[in-house]
Amino acid sequence: MTERAHDAATWPRLRVDDLTASFGATSAVRGASVDLNDREVTAVIGPSGCGKSTFLRCLNRLHETVPTARVEGRVLLDGRNIYATGVNPVAVRKLVGMVFQRPTPFPTMSIRDNVAAGLLVMSPRPSRKETDEIVERALKRAALFDEVKDRLGEPATALSGGQQQRLCIARALATDPEVLLLDEPTASLDPISSQKVEELVYELKRDMSVVIVTHNMQQAARVSDVTAFFLMGELVEAAPTKTMFTTPKDPRTEAYITGRFG
């Protein structure tokens, strides 16, 4: 769908333009516009039910998989609208990978086959040797290979919760995405596993754009370059994280960050 750019300069990998997302007659996101830069981590914060996860799911066309769901506006990936007529959603999801709040390994598949699952829809499909190389590379990028290299044939459910989440990240990385979406990826993990995922996010931003939804203010401050604040379906403001946490422009942002509501 796109050609990957190799310019080290920061530029918008994803450009969201007047995005509105609805479930039936109810709008979950209204008129959001923001640039999500390449090689940066954008944290999306806000109280429960404010539209954070819906916004994230619009970035790789998962929102439309829900009955009655509707999307208006544009999401540009490398300048091309992913909602344009003729754009294949499966092709979009190979370039914009997603990891969910709870680890979602395929329970009947081995560790290796979990990582390779996204390769099954590629054309031409990689050979077994190529697949093994891709699996190894993805597991290394997810900082998991050394822990599982002798267990690749075992069920993914044999892994710990933190390992399963990194396995899901490896599965998303196997298709070589340009953007990685993380929907509260550490919410169900212990502190040590959470720290490993945060360290991984820092590594991954070297060659892709990362967007992470989080309820954890400290996590947003630690891992992100830019923070976007949602409230009741509205993108209130987005700015460099240090600016957002010290001198936000909107009083609603300040009230949320300082804990006066939310």
Image (cartoon, helix red, strand yellow):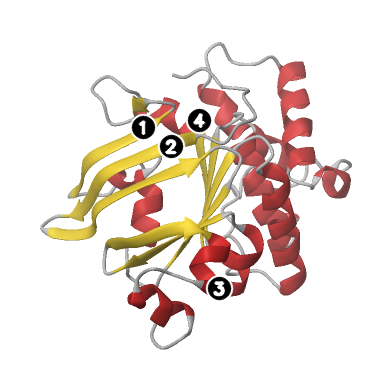
Q: Which residue is mark 1?
A: 76
Disc 2 from disc 3: Cα separation? 24 Å
Q: Looking at the image, which is closer to me, 50 or 154?
A: 50
Q: Tell me which numbered mark, 3 or 4, is placed earlier along the sequence.
A: 4
Q: Tell me which numbered mark, 2 or 3, is placed earlier along the sequence.
A: 2
Residue 251: x %, y % from top left: 35, 77
Position of 12 compared to 250: left or right?
right
Disc 1 from disc 4: Cα separation? 15 Å
Q: Which residue is mark 2?
A: 14
Q: Are marks 2 and 1 in contact (CB under 8 Å)?
A: yes
Residue 82: x %, y % from top left: 34, 30
Q: Tell me which numbered mark, 1 or 3, is placed earlier along the sequence.
A: 1
Residue 71 in sight in this render: yes
Q: Residue at x 39, y 42 (%)?
A: 59
Residue 127: x %, y % from top left: 69, 14
**Amino acid beneath label 3:** Met
Disc 4 from disc 2: Cα separation? 15 Å
Image mark for residue 94: 4
Q: Nearer the viewer, mark 3 or mark 4?
A: 3
Vertical placement of residue 224 versus 91, above or below: below
- In the rendered image, which quarter is residue 53 located in? bottom left
Position of 104 compared to 91: left or right?
right
**Amino acid beneath label 2:** Leu
Image mark for residue 217: 3
Image mark for residue 29: none
Where disc 4 sits, the SS reads helix
Position of 131 compared to 123: left or right?
right
